[in-house]
Image (cartoon, rainbow, N blue to C red):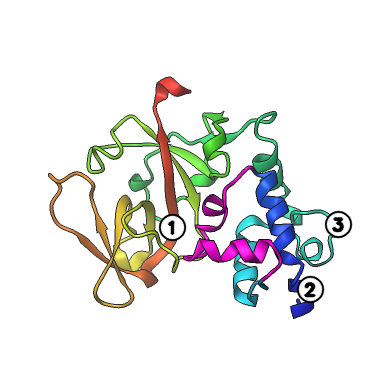
Amino acid sequence: MTDNQRKNFGPRLKEIRLAKKMTLQEFYSPIAKHVNNFSPIENGSRMIGKRLSEDVVKHYHINETWLATGVGKIFSGEDAFKELRTNHTETQQGVPFININPSDFSSGELNFLKEKPEYYVNFRPFNDCDAYLPVYGDSMFPKYSSGEIIAIRELVNKDIIQWGEAYLVIADESANNLTTVKLLFEHTTPGKIVLRAANPDYKGDTILDKSAIKRLFIVKGKITRNQL
């Protein structure tokens, strides 16, 4: 894409965001650290950078031709399902509830998002998520209690982490295929992160090389089973 084409990106990204009924924070926080920078981008007073535009396109599966020209479908080919799910969830089936404990499986054995859902959940605040998962154990109590259900959304840019927030971390063999939900904190050593339980009874942090992270999902929130 040329610089001249990227000048049109901002207003069209705003069009997508408003169609999804998402705030600036909700729409851009999985992609960029400084969300407020997107306000002038959407208003056309600042041009989005090449790398940042690529991250937005990849995360939301946007058709680059439409973003540059306004012509064609808004979302890209094989990911048309994403467009259907995020734009029409109130009349369609919603976000899948997958009744498994991801920590029971190594990252090499199972892509849990491909498991057959038990049902679908249509709850507007989390309709941009990839899945709902049950909470097992009490290491994240009182933030998340066993039996509650968390909504997760996968991040494209693993370098953009909201420190102190909960994430589902799936690591590779170098970290023993660790799969866990923990609070993430910045480590004093560059390239490492701290995984910490929310429950103060679970003492001791896990230190992980960021390069070992295979997939990373932010936990956007929770619901209880009586809300379903």
Question: Is residue 111 among what the camera can see?
Answer: no
Circle 2 residues within 10 Å: few <14, some 14–19, many ≥20: few
State left or right for residue 99 relative to residue 199.
right
- Residue that protrudes farthest toward the top in the picture: 226
Along the viewing direction, whichever of 159 and 163 lies nearer the viewer: 163
Question: Which residue in the protein does label 3 denote?
Answer: 72
Q: CA distance from mark 3 to mark 2?
A: 15 Å
- Residue that protrudes farthest toward the right in the picture: 71
The residue sitting at 31% across, 55% down in the picture is: 164
Residue 130 lies, in percent from the top left, at 54, 45
Q: At label 1, which amino acid type do we have?
A: Leu
Q: CA distance from mark 3 to mark 1?
A: 31 Å
Question: Which residue in the protein does label 2 denote?
Answer: 5
Residue 113 lies, in percent from the top left, at 52, 46
Circle 3 residues within 10 Å: few <14, some 14–19, many ≥20: few
Q: Quadrant of residue 77?
A: bottom right
Question: Is residue 200 among what the camera can see?
Answer: yes
Residue 50 lies, in percent from the top left, at 65, 76
The residue sitting at 39% across, 64% down in the picture is: 213
105 within the magenta span: no
Q: Secondary structure at mark 1?
A: strand
Q: At label 2, which amino acid type do we have?
A: Gln
Labelled disc at residue 133: none
Q: Quadrant of residue 81?
A: top right
State left or right for residue 175 relative to residue 222.
left
Mark closest to the chain's N terminus, 3 or 2: 2
Question: Which residue in the protein does label 1 denote?
Answer: 216
Q: Which portion, as a residue range, is magenta?
A: 21-45
Q: Relative to 95, is 214 above or below? A: below
Circle 1 residues within 10 Å: few <14, some 14–19, many ≥20: many
Q: CA distance from mark 2 to mark 1?
A: 31 Å
Q: Secondary structure at mark 2?
A: helix
